[in-house]
Each structure stands twice: as C-alpha cells, then as structure tokens.
C-alpha cells in the first residue's frame, strides 16, 4: 500500500525535479515519520521547487516564508487585531500543511524559535490561546551553508527538531540537459496536479505503526547513537531523540521499499541524514577537517551489524 503510494507521488514529482530520487525518497520518509526536513545547499539546486512539487503532489496546503532579519515571530504565527469592538485572530503562514521556511538562518533566533512549538507539538500559542495546526504539518527549511554574512546559525535544540538534513547537490550532466529541455517554455510545476490528499497521507502515517522492527535492530540503532557520544572527537553526540528519529526513518524507508519489516540497510541509509546535524565536533579537530559525517561513518564501521535473519 505505502509502496504504491510512494511510486505514484514520486512519479508525479519527477515531472518537475530531475535526478533527485534519493532526496525525494528521504523527504517522503520524513512525511511518513511525521518529521521535518532541513535542506542545506547552495542556491539554485532546486530546494524550493522540490518542496513545492512535493506539497502539490500530496494535495497539501503550501505556504512559503522568506526569512529575513526583520521577520517577527507574529509574522509566522499570526496576531490578534482589534476589529468591530473585539479582537480577531489573523492566522500567520504557519497555519498550513507544508511550510517552506526559506533561508531560515537569516532570521533572528527569536523568530526561529517561533517555529519550535509548531514543529514539536503541531500547535501555536498566541496571547495565551493555543490553536492546533491541521495535520499533517510538515516544515521544509532551507539554508545556504556557504554564505554566512548576516545569518544566525540554528541552535542545537532547534536542529534536533529536524528529523533529517539533506543536501541535493548538483545534477549529473545528462540530468542538467533534461532539466534545460523541460524548462525551455512553461515551468512544469505550473501544470502539476495532486495525486494524493491529506486523508491519504494521514492513513499512510498510521500504517507505518504496523511495521516490525526486531529487538536486534532496535539495539543496533541505540548502539549507533551511543557510538557518536563516545567518539573522542565529539563535543556533543546524538541525543535520545536522535535514536527515535533514526528508528522512525528506518521504518519509513522500509515501508517505501514495500516491506513490513526493517533491515540493517534501512538504518544505515538513514544514519547520515538523521545523525549528522545532531553531532558537534570538537573545535580543535574541526579545524583539522574532522566532520560529523566522518563521525557517523566511524560509528557505522565500529558497531556490529545484526547478522541473524531478519524479516
């Protein structure tokens, strides 16, 4: 069921995006797992287009906010205004289902933190009144890792709220040729139609709970996360929330592959996107070129993979 849904949605998105099959698979895994995604890459690689195409294909409401230093928390969450003798709530762009937070690191920490309640609890509190967001609610945030002037790096607590961090990278030469051919006239996203809806997405998310994950694989997830904490080059290792995120993402990848059970390869596939942004490398080794990606690679190499037959 989930595999057929994935094939339908992926085929539709690929009418717009070229050569981003793995990023799309992981983003849909994020949707299934009920998480949020941070897209970190240079401008012009298709981050905004991918988010918009995914929202349209899923039949979900979509809003885009350009984050800037003068953006206020109320510009996101909404505000109460006095009208006709009473206060009336005017909802902000966060009241949608897919929110694209473009260049999130250009807004101040106060504005960035306005998203925390929405991302963690699916609700927004304004002037003491809590208002639920419509499910599913999915944040896609982007940031440029190269240009640092005028930016406010996301704090660790907020980075930890993103289920996945992905990098799209540049397309292969043949893929770039196909892209240019498609975009000679009208952009294909203008004609893109939904192939799913919110009710079906919620149904897919609920179906994920039926997947089996053997105790040996649960232990494998825990051992990988703990290995990042004991690495001598790490100042801050992956949190317990990271273990939950790794488990949920591995389950979602298994479901997208048409299985009702998780394999070690699902965990390995999810490890980088789930763990890297949650790890802080010690400054003295960072200047020597040690990265969080290297720490995850070392953990995968050091932790024994379950060898018993699974599934």
Image (spheres, rainbow, N blue to C red):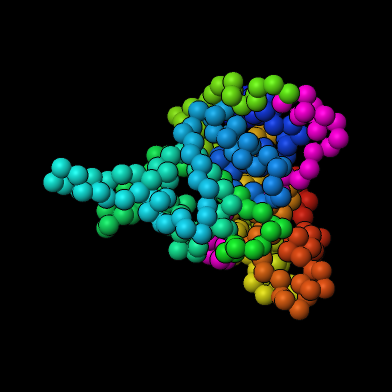
Assess whether residue 212 is covered by the magenta stretch. Answer: no
In the foreground, 214 or 231: 231
**In the image: residue 17, left or right of residue 95:** right
The residue shown at (38%, 45%) is 92
**Residue found 56% across the figure and 21% down from its top:** 193
Residue at position x 40%, y 42% from top?
95
Which residue reaches farthest left? 85
From the viewer's perspective, tell me whether residue 239 is left or right of residue 297. Answer: left
Q: Quadrant of residue 298?
A: bottom right
The region drawn magenta spans 154-183
| Position in image of residue 80 (x %, y %) | 27, 50
Q: Is residue 240 visible?
A: no
Q: Residue 96 at x, y = what percent?
A: 43, 39
Which quadrant does the C terminus fall into?
A: top right
Q: State the residue lying farthest toward the bottom.
A: 284
Q: Is residue 295 left or right of residue 166?
A: right
Q: Relative to 225, is 81 above or below?
A: above
Judging depth in this view, the residue of 310 and 81 nearest the camera is: 81
The percent position of residue 63, horizontal first and vertical second, equals 48, 39
- Where's the N terminus, which quadrant? top right
**Vertical side of 205 occupied by 14: above or below:** above
Q: Residue at x 53, y 65 (%)?
A: 157
Which image quadrant for residue 259? top right
Residue 167 magenta-highlighted: yes
């Amino acid at each position: 069921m989930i595999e057929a849904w994935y094939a339908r949605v992926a085929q539709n998105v690929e009418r717009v995006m070229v050569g981003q099959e793995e990023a799309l698979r992981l983003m849909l895994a994020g949707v299934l797992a009920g998480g949020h995604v941070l897209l970190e890459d240079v401008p012009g690689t298709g981050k905004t287009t991918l988010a918009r195409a995914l929202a349209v294909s899923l039949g979900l409401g979509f809003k885009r906010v350009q984050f800037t230093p003068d953006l206020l928390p109320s510009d996101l969450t909404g505000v109460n205004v006095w009208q006709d003798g009473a206060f009336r709530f005017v909802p902000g762009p966060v009241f949608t289902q897919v929110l694209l937070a473009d260049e999130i690191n250009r807004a101040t920490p106060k504005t960035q933190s306005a998203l925390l309640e929405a991302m963690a609890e699916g609700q927004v509190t304004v002037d003491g009144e809590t208002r639920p967001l419509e499910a599913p609610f999915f944040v896609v945030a982007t940031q440029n890792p190269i240009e640092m002037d005028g930016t406010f790096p996301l704090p660790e607590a907020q980075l930890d709220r993103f289920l996945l961090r992905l990098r799209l990278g540049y397309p292969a030469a043949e893929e770039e040729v196909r892209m240019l051919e498609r975009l000679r006239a009208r952009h294909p996203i203008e004609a893109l139609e939904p192939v799913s809806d919110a009710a079906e997405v919620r149904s897919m998310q609920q179906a994920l709970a039926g997947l089996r994950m053997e105790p040996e694989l649960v232990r494998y997830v825990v051992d990988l996360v703990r290995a990042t904490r004991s690495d001598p080059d790490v100042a801050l290792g992956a949190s317990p929330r990271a273990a939950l995120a790794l488990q949920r993402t591995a389950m979602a990848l298994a479901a997208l592959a048409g299985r009702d059970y998780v394999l070690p390869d699902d965990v390995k596939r999810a490890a980088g996107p789930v763990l890297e942004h949650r790890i802080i490398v010690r400054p003295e080794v960072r200047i020597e070129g040690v990265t969080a990606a290297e720490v995850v690679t070392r953990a995968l190499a050091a932790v024994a993979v379950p060898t018993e037959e699974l599934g």
